[in-house]
Amino acid sequence: MAGRTWDESDVRIRANKRGSRPRTKQRPSHEDAVVARVVAVDRGRYTCVVAEDGPQPRTVLCVRAKELRRQPVVPGDLVGVVGDVTGAPDTLARIVRIEPRSTVLRRSADDTDPVERVIVANADRLVLVLAAASPTPRTGFVDRGLVAAWDADITPVVCMTKSDLADPAEFLRYLHDLDVLTISTQRATDRGQRPEAGLHEQSLAISEESLNRLRDLLDGHVSVFLGPSGVGKSTLVNALTGAERATGGVNDVTGRGRHTSSSARALTVPGTSPGTWVVDTPGIRSLGLAHVAEEDLLNAFTDLVPATAECPRGCLHTADSPGCALDAWVHRPEASPAAPHRLESLRRLLAASRGETPRGDSEKRLGQGIT
Ligand SMILES: Nc1nc2c(ncn2[C@@H]2O[C@H](COP(=O)(O)OP(=O)(O)OP(=O)(O)O)[C@@H](O)[C@H]2O)c(=O)[nH]1
Ligand SMILES: [Zn+2]
């Protein structure tokens, strides 16, 4: 066999040899399926984009094949689609396969709800949106978001909006020792800078400099945006994507443009490379963490993990856990100067994943509220 190179014909020969197996047991292979990205889900109809990397991506409306009935298909999913995939009006294609997911962002309705739902697939960034002021940023929201992101193997980003109203630096210090990307955005001050006519006239204009930095951060990624009400998430998503989701203030008067659907949707970002998506999550304010295992959280603190070997069996590593080795370890010379802060962060996040909220009721509502 030396020097023999394999090619496609070899593969076919081997496949034929196995062809005597009863065919009925084999699922249809749908070799003709084209790969598409699910961008929106609405009452059994899936809006998918075919050829997202090509010069002419097109939108195709799909249903889910019977054999996939029990499997959730969510925005961000890459799926195999057969049938009429031209995207012509009144055509309906069929999703026959869900490609393996690189990540899944799940949520339980709250910390005690054992039922978890996949809300977005294949995201690699979770952008936690907070305002520097109005409303006052809450640490609980960030703690919970970080837990959700790390648990799902998604890179968290903290985005502070309204930095024209207050300096976000103080709040961002809270994230000091955590390996978290941060960015701040603000409204445009230049009165000459207007949103393109008719595009997002309802939205406040965001500074072009902020938007450029954001686009750099998002480029080539699938980013889920999550934020409490009123932080300016829609304003930001509109500015980035040219979408027209109603923003606070204006719609209250006109009642126009309010989207009633609360499911996530993926949007492209003009000015970025193909494959860049922003996933908007209207109506989802936070993520219940009932499904998050504490070990997974601990594993995000790679510097602290070895020290837990000295903990008593079953140690919860909380401040009042008897004999937790972490307390002493963070003050040892070999630990980094940041270690005590890191331990504080870990404990905060462990508390969040257990549904404990150290800061009273208003924090609790913000952290867990789902509207
Ligand atoms: N000063 C200032 N105001 C902003 C900024 N971004 C958004 N806003 C305003 O904040 C308010 C809330 O913005 P939205 O985009 O509706 O906030 P949201 O987070 O989508 O809120 P929901 O629609 O409740 O989810 C609006 O009046 C915006 O004009 C900003 O960077 N600076
Ligand atoms: Zn311990």
Image (cartoon, rainbow, N blue to C red):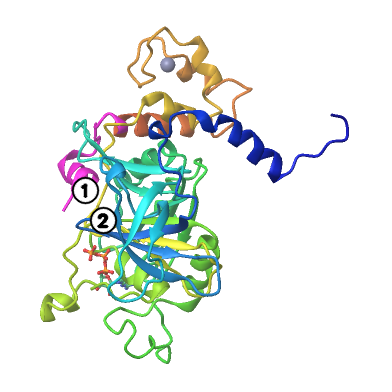
Residue drawn at point x = 50 percent, y = 10 percent: 310
Residue 207 seen in this snapshot: yes
Residue lying at the far top in this picture: please name it. 313
Residue drawn at point x = 39 percent, y = 43 percent: 104
Residue drawn at point x = 40 percent, y = 56 percent: 81
Residue 216 coordinates in the image, percent (x, y): 55, 65
Q: Quadrant of the N terminus?
A: top right
Residue 137 within the magenta-colored segment of the rendering? no
Kindly check if marks 2 and 1 are in contact, taking CB atoms under 8 A apart as contact.
yes
Mark 2 = which residue? 228
In the picture, the disc for residue 35 is: none
**Three-letter amino acid code at disc 2?**
Pro
**Three-letter amino acid code at disc 1?**
Leu
In the rendered image, the vertical position of residue 81 relative to residue 148, given as above or below = below
Gap between marks 2 and 1 measured at Cα: 7 Å
Residue 364 within the magenta-colored segment of the rendering? yes
- In front here: 360 or 53? 53
Ligand 1 neighbours mark 2 (CB distance < 8 Å): yes
- In front here: 85 or 212? 85
Looking at the image, in which quadrant does ligand 2 appear? top left
Mark 1 = which residue? 366
- In front here: 77 or 342? 77
Lateral position of residue 46 relative to residue 4, left or right: left
Residue 18 coordinates in the image, percent (x, y): 56, 30
Residue 101 coordinates in the image, percent (x, y): 45, 43
Residue drawn at point x = 43 percent, y = 86 percent: 190
Quadrant in the rendering for residue 338: top right
Residue 168 seen in this snapshot: no
* Magenta-highlighted residues: 353-371
Mark 2 / mark 1, whichever is N-terminal: 2
Label 1 secondary element: helix
Label 2 secondary element: loop
